[in-house]
Image: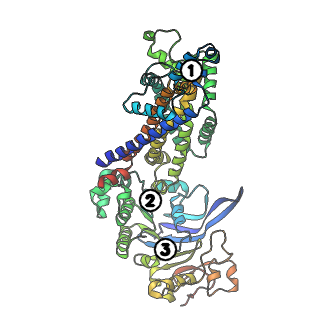
Amino acid sequence: MGHRIQFAAKKLLRMALLLLGVSLTAFLLMSASPLDPLQTNVGQAALGTMSQEQIARLEDYWGVNDPPLERYLGWLSSALRGDLGTSLLYRVPVVRVLGERMGSSLWLMAAAWVLSGLLGLTLGVLAGACRGRWPDRLIRGWCILISSTPAFWLALLLLMVFSVWMGIFPIGLSVPIGAEAAAVTLADRLRHAFLPALTLSITGVAGIALHTREKLCGVLESDYVLFARARGESAPSIVLRHGLRNVALPAITLQFASISELIGGSVLVEQVFSYPGLGQAAVTAGLGGDLPLLLGITVLTAALVFGGNLCADLLYGAVDPKIRRGAARR
Amino acid sequence: MRPILEVENLSISFLQYDRGARRRVLPAIRRLDLTLEAGQVAAVVGSSGSGKSLLAHGILGILPYNARMEGTLRYRGEPLTPQRAAALRGREIVLVPQSVGYLDPLMKVGPQVARDREKGRGVLGRYGLGPETGDLYPFELSGGMARRVLISTAVAASPALVVADEPTPGLDARAAGRILGHFRELAQGGAAVLLITHDLELALTIAHKVAVFYAGETVEEAPAADFARREDLRHPYTRALWDALPQHGFTPIPGTQPYPGAIPAGCPFAPRCPKRQADCGGAIPYQTVAGGRVRCLHPERGEGS
């Protein structure tokens, strides 16, 4: 057990360094941005009617005149104490914005993650087991079509078909418009999350299915599958007994690595569906010059992605007998 | 007695794509002949690329999809069709593979030897492997253990024909001898054993007969006893193999075995043969000479000698 704790500790240290680097990069990019937060958020016309003192106070608020290094160090020192600052746009603590946004995004991403993982694995195994025949061609063709389709375009398409033409699903947001918070039911939330989650799942399936197929094809051409055939095992038995077992390890890596793609995809998809999640907040914060919020989101999503990879690494140790037995013997 | 296995004029070729869409047929095995009886160990010797492993895969019906097999393959007197091979493999016809790479790396050894736990333990025990071996993964086996595990996979069925594909590489002489001893036991138990190897010396320690492969052809089938004296061997290539044994002076002959697709017409050994004559480029009959068979127009050992 000790070696695994040591392993995790090393990984966590690396994660701290990574988060530091990510936040610094995001900050530098933000400082280099040509967007003037005053013009974006107050507007040219409004700025024209303001007195110099008002403008100076606004510049102070948006931190335009502070030296970048000082701003970053200031953010960093309070972030280390657990205070991510106050969102300049929403005027509430960043942690609260993150919490709310995370709540709605988490549903979306979790559903898409599980769905695309299960569906992708199933389709990939099916295609690999039937390689060269029509189910394989069909699945591969569909996956290639889907991976070459931009997520936002697919989102628009689904929105048009299911919400505008058929009217089955709402056209956006996470709750019905004008409803009281207390009156919103779980069914309402699910109905609003369905199309965004579907979009994310569909785009996620393609990569997982294609990778799984490749891996299974490799397994089916291996010597141990040849030997299994020589011992009279049937093709379905080979796929179930040896195929799934040997595809499981790369599938774990793939599944956890897909978290980063999911977060990237959610930014676009949430934008199209006006779904008030983390992705949409990232766009708003980036375009509006809301530095504390953007840094908060960046750090949080980087931590999520890193956490996913860490999970995959730790699971590997539990699943792969070479790592498990090898480490236990040391 | 009716032979367990008869291979007559067997050929295996591959359909290949080379340079774009041009297809070509690559003959890997061209004229293989072999007969094997119950209780007998027949060694198939030949250097790498002579078609030894392909013969094994052909018998078991597990050739790759782009391979084509022609000629006659009979098991217990009946043609061994792909359907029949599929029904028999793993039951009556078993393969003992080359290396531990033929075991699923993520599955414990026990369930791979036999699905039935008790039976698996029994079989492992027969080869001196304790019940704890069943709980090991293939990567945890030592070289000698791995060989014994691979043999036990074969014995878990009750085979009539055991095809052993290079069962001894990487073992020292004593360990290899022990492993071969297990094959001899199987033959004494009534099974026919086809021992595929490139190690003539080792094969002679247990084999009853030896088939020598060269460039996808059987050049000679001889009783193992004939290998005691150079004069009893029929084919020039067999004599060359004999000369190359350490105890006979380690004498090599120049040249290399031709690759499939670049094999000369007539006798494939002719370019390297010291006894080559003008007619060696024509048809070569497979003839019976002094209790063995040889594919040579001018065998070293005549009918009378």
Kindly identify the residue that appears in the image at 58 percent across and 28 percent down: A268
Which dot, 3 or 1, sits closer to the camera? 1
Q: Where does label 1 land, which residue?
A: A274
Q: Residue B118 location, x and y as percent?
A: 29, 52
Chain of the residue under the numbered disc 1 shown in the image: A
Q: Residue A288 location, x and y as percent?
A: 56, 24
Q: Residue B89 location, x and y as percent?
A: 46, 57
Please tell me whether residue A135 is drawn above or below residue B160 in the rendered image.
above
Chain of the residue under the numbered disc 3 shown in the image: B
Residue toward you, B111 or A256 = A256
Q: Which mark is residue B101?
A: 2
Please tell me whether residue B219 is drawn above or below residue A282 in the rendered image.
below
Where disc 1 sits, the SS reads loop
N-term-proximal mark, 2 vs 3: 2
Q: Where does label 3 land, which residue?
A: B198
The quarter holding residue B257 reads: bottom right
Q: Which mark is residue A297?
A: none
Name the kind of residue labelled 1 in the image.
Answer: Ser
Residue B1 relative to residue B273: left or right: left
Kindly identify the residue that appears in the image at 67 percent across and 82 percent down: B280
Please tell me whether residue A28 is drawn above or below residue B17 in the rendered image.
above
Chain of the residue under the numbered disc 2 shown in the image: B
Name the kind of residue labelled 2 in the image.
Answer: Gly
Residue toward you, A12 or B130 = A12
Report, in whole angstroms, how far the alpha carbon at label 3 lies from the one at label 1. 71 Å
Where disc 2 sits, the SS reads helix
Circles 3 and 1 in contact, beta carbons < 8 Å: no
Q: Are marks 1 and 2 on the same chain?
A: no
Where disc 3 sits, the SS reads loop
Q: Are marks 2 and 3 on the same chain?
A: yes
Report, in whole angstroms, how far the alpha carbon at label 1 lies from the one at label 2. 54 Å
Report, in whole angstroms, how far the alpha carbon at label 2 lies from the one at label 3. 19 Å
